[in-house]
Image (tube, rainbow, N blue to C red):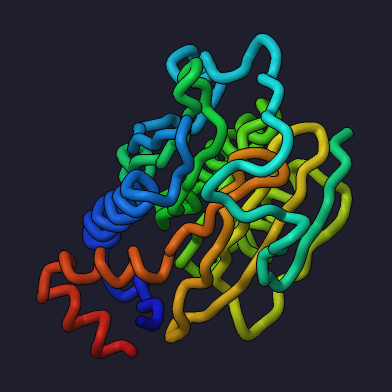
Amino acid sequence: MPVHDWTRVSDAAFHDFHYSWVLEIKRALTRGLLPKGYYVMAEQIGGDLGTPDVLTLQAAAPAVEPEGHLAGTATLTETPPLVHARTTIERDHYARLQRTLVVRHSSDDRIVAMIEILSRGNKSSRHAMRSSLDKAVAALDSGVHLLLVDVHPPGPRDPHGIHGALLGEIGTEEYVLGSDRRLTVAAYTGGVVVDAFVAHFAVGEPVPQMPLFLTRENYVQVPLEQSYVSAWEDVPRRYQEVLLAAS
């Protein structure tokens, strides 16, 4: 199913869809994608990942990732993700309500990865954008792997997309977004060295499948397109008609 132009409907309409999409991804991860020893929950996380509720994260010392292959995952070496760009960086109101998918390890409940589907509210103001970027940077600083999904076009605060904005926070290179595909999905490995895997798409195209890293080498493929289709079924007909008319 092609991605719809969500600028045609209200923030409330997308927030409702966002809720369903997050739930569908959670179901897919829980019902077989995550290997033994990992679990996922939909959690409400504020912009500042430094809050005690969340960064009981790895504040003391990042846990050592297991070495070798994890059963049920692909490996970066043997099966590199098909993306448009990979960058390795050497490190020197609805938005507040939305849920983040948080993957934890069963042994100690530490956060190992997060999936964030951005809403327009995440980029609606300087403060909102700052909070979103701070949250992402704090996750990567803590060794948490990250998957960002942005089906909204770039605005004045992210002229080169959410990846370009985040790269400006953690790297030294400038990222230039092309003119044809303006929507973004990006996967990041957390830690001192960040590997970024980026794919761009446009309204009218399917959401690309993307990896969610559980370690720096092991990942599961997140069925973003399949979960998008399932979530679409729950969109009220009133908004489906508006979005389909704009296609």
Q: Residue 70 in the image: state x and y as whole percent.
A: 60, 42
In this view, the residue in front, 191 or 122, is 191
* Res. 11 visible in picture: no
- 206 to the left or right of 50: left
Q: Residue 81 in the image: state x and y as whole percent.
A: 67, 65
* Res. 128 visible in picture: yes
Which residue is drawn at the image coordinates 69% and 20% (left, top)?
62
- 56 to the left or right of 227: right
In this view, the residue in front, 108 or 118, is 108
Q: Residue 194 in the image: state x and y as whole percent.
A: 77, 43
Which residue is drawn at the image coordinates 24% and 55% (left, top)?
20
Q: Residue 66 in the image: state x and y as whole percent.
A: 68, 30
Specify the quadrant that holds the C terminus: bottom left
Which residue is drawn at the image coordinates 81% and 57% (left, top)?
87
Which residue is drawn at the image coordinates 33% and 51% (left, top)?
22
Specify the quadrant that holds the N terminus: bottom left
Based on the displayed image, in which of its 4 quarters is residue 144 positioned?
A: top right
